Amino acid sequence: MTRLSSPSWTPITCAAATLVLALLGIFYPVVEFTVHTWLSNDTYLHDFLIPFVSIWLIWRERQILRHLSPQPAWIALFLFLGLSVVEELGALSNTIVVEQFALVGLVISGIWFLIGHASFRHLLFPLLFLFLAIPFGESFIPPLMDLTADFATLLLRLTGIPVFREGNFLSLPTGNWSVVEACSGLRYLIASLTLGVLFAQMAFHRWSRRLLFLLASLVIPVVANGVRAYLIILIGHLSGMRLAVGVDHLIYGWIFFGLVMYLLFWLGSLFRDAPLPIAAQPASPSFGMATQTLRTPFWLALLPLALIGLSRWHTLDHQPSQTLPPMSPLALPRWPSWIASPDTPVWTPHFSGARWKIEQSYHQADTESTLTLYLAHYQNQGLGHSLVTTGNTLVIPQDHQWTLIRANSSHLLPVSLTNIPFTEALIGSSHEQRLVWQFLRVGQHWLTSPYQVKWWEAWDLFTGHDDGANLLILSTPYDPLQPQRATSTLQTFCHDILPTLDAQPDSRP
């Protein structure tokens, strides 16, 4: 059997392994957070296999690599330095996804530097495949939920089944259905994309066929998920809500997805290209043969690590302290028209890591309007203590009581001669629906986008300020027959409280 351990590859393999292990150790918090996400979210559980698949793909190239002599690619150091700065900016703004992508980029550029251009060309795909191990895509859940509801509603009406749709809540004569986050199809889409990328690389050599198959791997799961939702609703409707309403709901979904994936890859296999012959020698002799004396010394692995230290030293003073005591919440002022209730709010959003938070129910005596207030303050943010992070959302999939009926949409609220942006969502349970307004504030800036929040947090730290951010979420009962009543309640409350809250300091010493 041909071995990869030729005299020129033995030291460089050790150097590359040392560099990768050092990077994983230096950025251990990022690695730990990524692994925790794999374990806690079934959508990304398959990501555990991607590093092993990447290693296997590299091993498949050993027949070609044995004829190449690794040489340092000095241009890759510039990319490595740039990515190290990007990683530090991600850490500064607590943007974990930026840190994750930068860490994978550091691994790839570091290996590129050590093995040289010729060898890297053959390992480009196995290394780029590592990017699919990053948990991403949650921002696509709301539009995917809407598409699933659109498909299901259209097919139900085409088959003559009456359906009333309110957001992502579908009402049939036999029962009610809700398109929740778990029904968005993100799990199917990511799994299909991962398998599609791998299959396209191994089965096709022409880029036209690869791109066409990748397009099919993205479009077909989205359409199939809408059909899956329709079929489940149809089974429940025809069975009088006896089937497809429990565990069998998930079983039918995975069986259908497995069948669709089987058909997709079966069709792809019919058009696969013939394997290319393995070249005995590299096309260009300028890259050198294994018998040449020009090799990459082991100590060059220290250069990328030195660049990491160079990019990190100037940001050490900005690292958030993890030992700060919890701050006392600001005392909310009294509003004569709104009476605080001792009752526990019927619903609170799923946000963790705040320095302090307030949960309060209110009612208005003259109108009998009721609502809940959730106010949280974040400061000295880091992993597990950040406003914008994975898991901080209105409703989580693990919450079997509340579901997201209508995703966030941006609006402007005129208050005190200014327009304050906010996002609106509709959530529901088995006994009620609630209209939710969410406000985000960093410094003096009212925001709606999590990307805007991250930008202003990083800017405040860069300019020597703290990264304090506030979250305000209001909710009130929602009646589909009188939707304007819930909107009016929240508008009245905001006009009463926002000018007062706007005058409050962001934090306390």
Image (tube, helix red, strand yellow):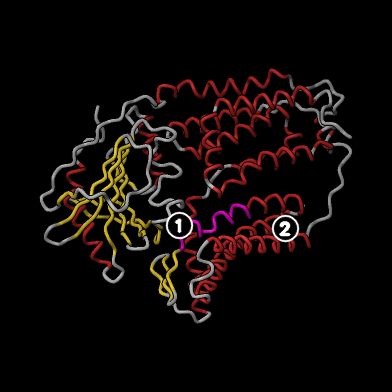
Q: Earlier in the sequence, mark 2 or mark 1?
A: 1
- Indicate which disc residue 142 carries: 1
Q: Is residue 115 magenta?
A: no
- For label 1, the SS is helix
Of residues 233 and 320, the one drawn nearer to the viewer in this rendering: 233
Q: Which part of the image, by quadrant, shows the C terminus? A: top left
Q: Residues within 10 Å of mark 2 (few under 14, many from 20)?
A: some
Residue at the bottom extreme, as displayed: 160
What residue appears at the point 51 percent right and 36 percent down from the top-left corner?
A: 33
Q: Residues within 10 Å of mark 1 (few under 14, many from 20)?
A: some
Magenta part of the chain: 179-192
What residue appears at the point 69 percent right and 27 percent down from the top-left corner?
A: 17
Percent x, y of residue 117: 73, 33
- Disc 1 residue type (three-letter): Pro
What residue appears at the point 58 percent right and 26 percent down from the top-left corner?
A: 25
Percent x, y of residue 101: 56, 38
Provide the residue designation for mark 2: 209
Q: In whole angstroms, how far apart are the C-alphas of marks 2 and 1? A: 31 Å
